[in-house]
Amino acid sequence: MAEPFDVVIVGGGQAALAASYFLRRTGLTYVILDNGTQAGGAWVHGWDSLHLFSPASYSSLPGWPMPDTPDGSYPTRDEVLDYLHRYEARYAPPIHRPVMVGRVERTDQKFLNVRTSVGDFVSRAVIGATGTWSAPFIPDYPGRELFVRTQIHSSHYRNALPFAGQRLLVVGGGNSGAQIMAELSLVAQATWVTQHDPVFLPDDVDGRVLFERATARVLGGPSAMPTGGFGDIVMVPPVRAARERGVLHAVRQFVRMTATGVVWPDGREEAIDAIIWCTGFRPALSMFAPLDVIEPDGLIRVNGQQAVREPRLWLLGYGSWCGPASATLLGAGRVARSMVRQLAAWLASPAQGVR
Ligand code: FAD
């Protein structure tokens, strides 16, 4: 058997880069396996006009701050991608691309075996950093399988061009729904469908405040956390402009879908050309299923970032369930710092055998 790595990181987006920054200083051996063809993780697939909800100074990975945008505005998708490309070039983390990780299994010794499209990697610990983009979620609407016209998830939405002049439904009341609705309403007859009234943050509240809330929650527990959270809609300039145009009205859900449209609660049937599902994602964890760690809710139970049922498995990114704000650029760095410290200590503990 080849010499095992101390750590294998599965996934090569921002969370993996943050973990790598701190791992490099520990002297542990590690490798990053990413099925993408270029740097950037989920940002490669974001829609063209996607804006961050915080300024560059609140969107940096450890070590090298994201450069300010020329006009101090919220960075766009392309600016984030450029930053991630340059961050990788600067730190040259040991990333192998494209490598698809199919399964992570226990060996009969003390290791995990990471089975990939290019062979097996044996490791003392594995960090899951696979994000959520590859696991889009669409709710189970009655008749959805009958609909013969276009339906796409926000994960595959690029821009408004293919939808010009059409009758559309944009489903979902988070930041994706608001940003995509704002854009489509300029060129199409779009209706915004949400489960509840969307929650808009005040104009002067952006990602900065949300990070401070997440920090307050960590320091002071839930009672110290002011209301509002990462799901609430940040009034980035295009969303604010849409509000000024009076198009950000949301209606409640339709009761079922037909071959060519939807039926509303009052029985009215409406023809629709396309539906854009902005209904979120689930963590992409299926490669860890052979470890028998996935709970009925689809998550992995963690103590901090360490899986409770498999202590060799650590998780970073995904959402606040594995570290406050860890699905964001700034949050991933903060959580990675403490996670790597704990992981290194755990690997050095007598039970794990110092190498
Ligand atoms: P990803 O970027 O998804 O990277 C995971 C990598 O793992 C990918 O390259 C993927 O291909 C790879 N992978 C998956 N499965 C496998 C496998 N089996 N084998 C090998 N590789 C695999 N974040 C912010 O910080 N600030 C913001 O202002 C912000 N605004 C946002 C606004 C919107 C509207 C949206 C939708 C998102 C926003 N985000 C923001 C969040 C951000 O886009 C993601 O949360 C982030 O990309 C997650 O990073 P990650 O490294 O955890 O996962």
Image: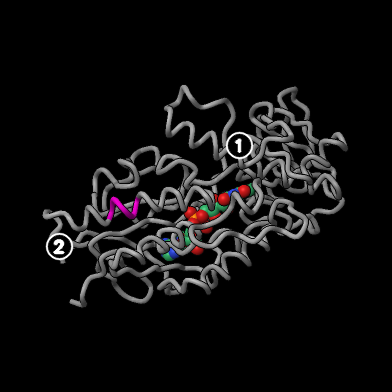
x and y percentages locating residue 65 in the rendered image: 57, 59
Q: Of residues 263 and 187, which is closer to you in this image?
A: 187
Amino acid found under the numbered disc labelled 1: Val
Residue 99 against residue 66 in the figure, above or below:
below
Residue at left 46%, top 64%?
A: 12
Establish whether ligand 1 lies closer than 8 Å to the Cβ of label 1: no
- Residue 159 circle label: none
Q: Earlier in the sequence, mark 2 or mark 1?
A: 1
* Main SS class of the magenta portion in the image: helix
Crowding around mark 2 (Cα neighbors within 10 Å: few <14, some 14 to 19, many 20+) is few
Residue wearing tag 2: 354
Give residue 46's position: percent from left, percent from top.
64, 57
Q: Which mark is residue 209?
A: 1
**Residue 342 highlighted magenta (yes or no):** yes
Total number of numbered labels? 2
**Is 68 contained in the magenta span?**
no
Give the residue at x 74% y 51%. 73
**Residue 205: image location, x then y, percent:** 67, 35
